[in-house]
Amino acid sequence: IGSGYVTPISGDFGVDGVVLSKNGNVLIQCKHTKKLTNDAIQQIISGKIVYEKELNVKFDKLIVITTTNDMSNEVYEFPEKYNKEIEIYTRKDLAEMLTKNKTKYSEIIEKSKRYSIEELRKEVKYKITN
């Protein structure tokens, strides 16, 4: 079991969510768009570099979540290039997951609390010492 954090609306280096877990750390990027392009993939890869350096932890998985089912051809190539380190979830995937796993809004978000890199650093330090 781990902890999940939502990053600030801007200045998040292409990362919208951070999951810190003994089973592997995850970075998440969410895109509300008509067509997912490789820019989203490149942003989360760049974000991984920043977050690993700033938090001094390794991120094993990168996830891009999008509200569209339409993706550019380049997007399909990226997971193969990065040994499936990147997972992409489309609108269809999200609908299937939410249908399968009944979820309430109150279970999804902690009343709009967002964590800066500085706050995440404190969380990482706390988890390491406890």
Image: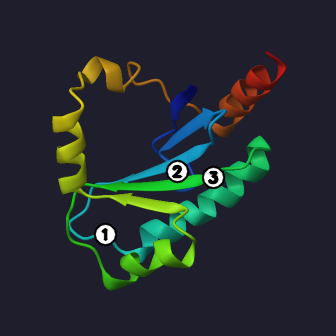
Q: Nearer the viewer, residue 37 or 97?
A: 97
In three-dimensional space, the C-alpha distance between marks 1 and 3, rounded to whole angstroms, equals 22 Å
Instruction: Find numbered disc 3 in the image and state the secondary structure of the residue it sits on.
Output: loop
Q: Quadrant of the C terminus?
A: top right
Q: Who comes first in sequence, dot 2 or dot 1?
A: 2
| Mark 2 vs 1: CB contact within 8 A | no
Amino acid carrying label 1: it is Leu
Disc number at residue 83? none
In three-dimensional space, the C-alpha distance between marks 2 and 3, rounded to whole angstroms, equals 14 Å
Question: Percent position (x, y) of residue 48?
Answer: 64, 57
Please identify, in this view, whether the residue under mark 1 or under mark 3 is nearer the observer: 3
Residue 66 appears left or right of 48: left
Q: Which residue is mark 1?
A: 36
Question: Percent position (x, y) of residue 22?
Answer: 67, 33
For label 3, the crowd category at 10 Å Cα-Cα, with few meaning under 14, some 14 to 19 and many 20 or more, is few
Q: Residue at x 80, y 25 (%)?
A: 128
Q: Residue at x 52, y 38 (%)?
A: 7
Q: Quadrant of the N terminus?
A: top right
Q: Is residue 54 above or below residue 2?
A: below
Residue sitting farthest toward the bottom = 73
Q: Residue at x 53, y 31 (%)?
A: 5
Q: Which residue is mark 2?
A: 15
Residue 64 appears left or right of 69: right
Within the image, what quadrant is residue 122 found in?
top right
In three-dimensional space, the C-alpha distance between marks 2 and 1, rounded to whole angstroms, equals 16 Å
Question: Percent position (x, y) of residue 16?
Answer: 47, 45
Question: How many numbered discs?
Answer: 3
Within the image, what quadrant is residue 2 found in?
top right
Amino acid carrying label 2: it is Val
Amino acid carrying label 3: it is Asp
Q: Which residue is mark 3?
A: 60
For label 1, the crowd category at 10 Å Cα-Cα, with few meaning under 14, some 14 to 19 and many 20 or more, is many
